[in-house]
Image: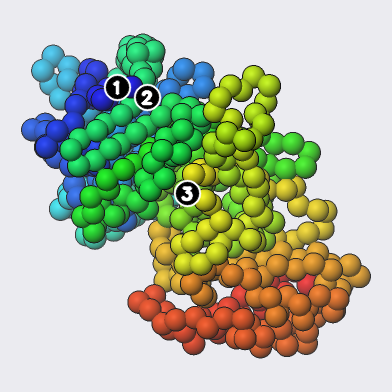
Amino acid sequence: MQATISFILDGKIQSLGFNEQFKPTTTVLNYLRSLANHKGVKEGCAEGDCGACTVVIAELNQNDSLQYTAWDSCLVFLPMIHGKQLITVENLIQYNAGEKRLHPVQQAMVDCNGSQCGYCTPGIVMSMFSLYKEKTPLSKENIEDALTGNLCRCTGYKPIIEAAARACAEIKVDQFDSNEKQIVAMLLQIKDQSKSILIDTTKQKYCRPKTINEALELRNKMQNSVLINGATDVALRVTKRHELLEEIIDLSGIPELKKFTKTAIDFKFGAGMSLENVKKVAEGALPALFETLAVFGSKQIRTLATFGGNVGSGSPIGDTLPVLMAYNAEIVLQQISEDAAPLNTEQSFPNISERKINMNNYILGYRETERKPKEIITAIIIPTPLANTIIKFYKVSKRKDLDISTLSGGFSILLKNNCVETITLAYGGMAAVTKRAKKAEQYLIGKLWDRATVDQAMELIAEDFTPISDARSGAEFRKLAAKNLLLKFWSETK
């Protein structure tokens, strides 16, 4: 194993060790702020809500070409950028014979008067730059999606959106295209020389394995360690609560966990797939899951957050949990077991045992799940929905974008002669766990799917849940909204 990380910054390979100044849980934001020439990145909220700290990461895809994504650097621990190129707003400017030349996204912000105080501007520019490098067909929807994770309190968004539209309307070759071969060669060099990472200071132990077997071995030995992948949730324990995480296993460097496979009977998502990539797969194929992720955080969050991480948190307001119940999904768990037969004939010790838990049985209590201390979530399996099954997702929140659910619902129904054959009514935010409205479901089975029946079922919702009042809403509102979501579901499926 190695105790240092390597990444590209300012066109050069940077190698970094860890000491009192830089800990394994030092964020990329704080690292950049410690450098004299990278002050453009700003801390606004330290929780991924404002986008002032946005940077762009370039990494190798399956074809060994560069893929660019925007990240909230306040949520990224330094070891997570190993083997990647880190790009900040300072890197966008070109120098020609000593003369500065702005990148097209920067120039568009100037031309469209998209900046006033300027505190948020570097983050906005980097989100625009990520969109520019995607080179996808331009639309108002994908411009707004790219900018959803950036708050601006003084300019207003119209000139910013105009700047993005102008910059990305005619994408030209920039210095990053010209330097791509050189950057790819450096990243391949880092990749070829990379081992698994073990950073062991006097106070922290940070492990970043390269294979699932190695991760399971580590988990077997470090059962109290914190598991991370995108770390968008766990990072808040460091940035907001100032916790010292003593043992961490970082799964973000395991390619096996990022794979997706589709068969005639199911969709299998690796637990390490980013929610943005899950969203792309779900579009058209699993519309309710796509709708869930379309209002999940921001693009910066979704490119970091992983499917397994959201499921593994067991949060009562985790947006994917209700819809996964509606899809009757299964969670795949693996662990080392000396008594288990190998999963395949080529597998050597350690043997890996695997089990699948239906999502409807996975949550046990508040942030308590079926996962045992030795186990790691390796995949989420969604069965191909039966013909004529209708599945919907609903989210109630104060803001449409980048907001925590006040409550949410994942509903599915199969009708036969307009009678309810099967139904799932899963709610988030209504209890200490994501939970199904069992009494309402049982009442509806076998009955006509009409307004009178639904009105009766709505009254049973209150018997299934005793929600609390908190900063997001009162208990009475939650009860009323939960009833109305069932009515909305009926109105969209009758």
Q: Which residue is mark 3?
A: 373
| Colour mapping used in the image | rainbow
Instruction: Determine the CA span between mark 1 and mark 2.
Output: 6 Å
**Does 348 sit left or right of 73 as displayed?**
right
Locate residue 124, reporting x and y percent.
Answer: 29, 45
Residue 268, by quadrant, is: top right
Residue 44, by quadrant, is: bottom left
Q: How dense is the environment of label 2, judged by Cα within 10 Å: few (below 14), some, or many (20 and up)?
A: some
Question: What type is the residue that disc 2 sits on?
Answer: Ser
Instruction: Determine the CA span between mark 1 and mark 3.
Output: 26 Å
Which of disc 3 and disc 1 is earlier in sequence? 1
Residue 106, by quadrant, is: top left
Question: What type is the residue that disc 3 sits on?
Answer: Pro
Q: Which residue is mark 1?
A: 2
Q: Is residue 53 visible?
A: yes
Locate residue 191, reporting x and y percent.
Answer: 38, 17
Please tell me whether mark 1 sits on a helix, a strand or a loop: loop
Residue mark closest to the camera, 2 vs 3: 3
Q: Which residue is mark 2?
A: 196
**Does 347 sit left or right of 226 as displayed?**
right
Q: Above or below — where is 230 with respect to 346?
A: below
Please tell me whether mark 3 sits on a helix, a strand or a loop: loop
**Which residue: 52% across, 83% down?**
466
Locate residue 433, reporting x and y percent.
Answer: 52, 68
